[in-house]
């Protein structure tokens, strides 16, 4: 789960309005790319809307060591003085993306393992968790900017027994997949990075759901090279999990969750459902000793929801036979009203308790999805 995806921090030279508005526009581009999942988002947006979409912001004075590091990293000649933290309104961002026919990529995102084999002319090595490297830093920073959770391999004795440098360099996927299993990730990015003819060349591959994508990049600037590589990978991954709003194909269904044996588990399940990109609204319709039924309004379809739930591993499928269709009222008698928090996906946080309304519409058995809380 990625947090703070609607927040950006940028260095600025002063606190004047023009500088602040320019930072707002730059931050809107970053957030729009992160939430939509596509690097093409800026070409379809009016970034002049940025100021109206900011929920809050604040300045913090930068320390000289931080300024010096920034100047060195970016090769800029203008010295910043402040960090400007910006938080955008999530509802407005989603409305903007919807109006621009762009998808929304929610908080639940796949963990991605990065194998990067490097030849720098004299040495050859595999980047690992414990390494300090400007190459690794560039990959990590771009992944953070795009909202892609990445994992670096330990490449310890266990990994090296299964996976040799030559396997990575030759992009042999069988040993790569075997070595990757210990990390429990959803996707694997494989890079072969070579210093040749005065510049870096990287051959990238992405393995996701038994499909492989390949691309090649050449550049002298490491930040640009790593950023572009992770950017392309993120575009491919988000195309699988980001959800387009479809007003013509909205669905309603029941998610039945077992193993909710405490208020804490109920809160965990309800917050999780409300955080999913296809979910517009969630409320409880039926409380049973063995399970709770959550009525879910979708923007999109059932397959979008099932795919993203499978990704998150918070809920696992439950095969208990469905005893009867879910309805309210039942047998002509309304169920007892139960006080539970109502959770709306457009709200940042549920803050009130209300009475569950009657739902007089029968929901077909095929539209009851059954899960258990994992763990």
Image (cartoon, rainbow, N blue to C red):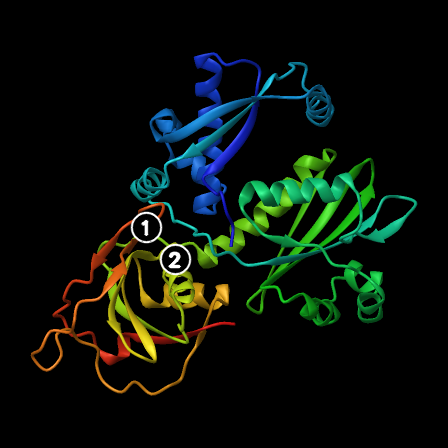
Identify the residue at image location x=36%, y=39%. Answer: 93
Per the rendering, the mark at residue 88 is none
Residue at image coords 49%, 53%:
238
Q: Nearer the viewer, residue 45 or 15?
A: 15
Is residue 274 at least partly visible in the picture?
yes
Q: Number of marks in the image?
A: 2
- Identify the residue shown where x is 27% and y is 74%: 367
Earlier in the chain: of badge 2 and badge 1, it is 2
Q: Which residue is mark 2?
A: 271
Indicate the position of residue 70 as horizontal and vertical percent values: 68, 25
Q: Residue at x 81, y 69 (%)?
A: 158
- Name the secondary structure under disc 1: loop
Alpha carbon distance from label 2 to label 1: 9 Å
Residue 277 in sight from this viewpoint: no
* 224 displayed left or right of 165: left
Q: Nearer the viewer, residue 64 or 171?
A: 64
Q: Which residue is mark 1?
A: 350
Residue that protrudes farthest toward the left in the picture: 332
Query: In x, y percent, where is residue 44?
Result: 38, 36
Front one among 140 and 238:
140
């Amino acid at each position: 789960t990625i947090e703070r995806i609607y927040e950006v921090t940028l260095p600025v030279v002063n606190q004047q309005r023009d500088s602040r508005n320019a930072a707002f526009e730059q931050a809107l581009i970053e957030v729009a790319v992160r939430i939509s999942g596509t690097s093409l988002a800026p070409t379809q947006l009016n970034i002049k809307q940025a100021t109206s979409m900011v929920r809050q912001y604040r300045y913090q004075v930068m320390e000289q060591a931080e300024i010096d590091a920034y100047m060195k990293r970016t090769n800029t000649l203008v010295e910043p003085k402040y960090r400007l933290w910006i938080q955008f309104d999530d509802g407005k961002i989603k409305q903007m993306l919807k109006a621009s026919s762009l998808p929304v990529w929610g908080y639940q995102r796949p963990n991605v393992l990065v194998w990067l084999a490097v030849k720098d002319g004299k040495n050859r090595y595999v980047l690992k968790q414990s390494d300090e490297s400007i190459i690794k830093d560039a990959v990590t920073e771009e992944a953070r900017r795009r909202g892609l959770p990445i994992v670096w391999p330990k490449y310890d004795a266990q990994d090296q027994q299964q996976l040799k440098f030559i396997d990575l360099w030759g992009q042999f996927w069988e040993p790569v997949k075997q070595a990757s299993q210990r990390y429990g990730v959803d996707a694997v990015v494989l890079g072969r990075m070579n210093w040749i003819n005065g510049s870096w060349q990287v051959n990238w591959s992405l393995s996701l759901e038994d499909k492989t994508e390949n691309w090649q990049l050449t550049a002298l600037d490491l930040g640009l090279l790593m950023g572009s590589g992770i950017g392309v990978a993120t575009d491919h991954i988000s195309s699988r999990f980001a959800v387009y709003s479809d007003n013509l194909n909205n669905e309603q269904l029941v998610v039945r969750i077992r193993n909710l044996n405490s208020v804490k588990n109920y809160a965990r399940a309800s917050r999780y459902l409300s955080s999913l990109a296809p979910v517009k609204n969630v409320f409880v319709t039926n409380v049973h000793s063995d399970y709770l039924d959550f009525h879910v309004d979708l923007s999109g379809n059932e397959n979008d929801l099932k795919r993203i739930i499978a990704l998150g591993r918070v809920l696992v499928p439950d095969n208990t036979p469905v005893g009867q269709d879910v309805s309210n009222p039942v047998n002509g008698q309304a169920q007892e009203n139960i006080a539970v928090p109502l959770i709306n996906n457009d709200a940042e946080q549920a803050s009130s308790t209300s009475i569950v309304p009657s739902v007089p519409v029968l929901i077909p058995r095929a539209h009851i999805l059954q899960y258990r809380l994992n763990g």
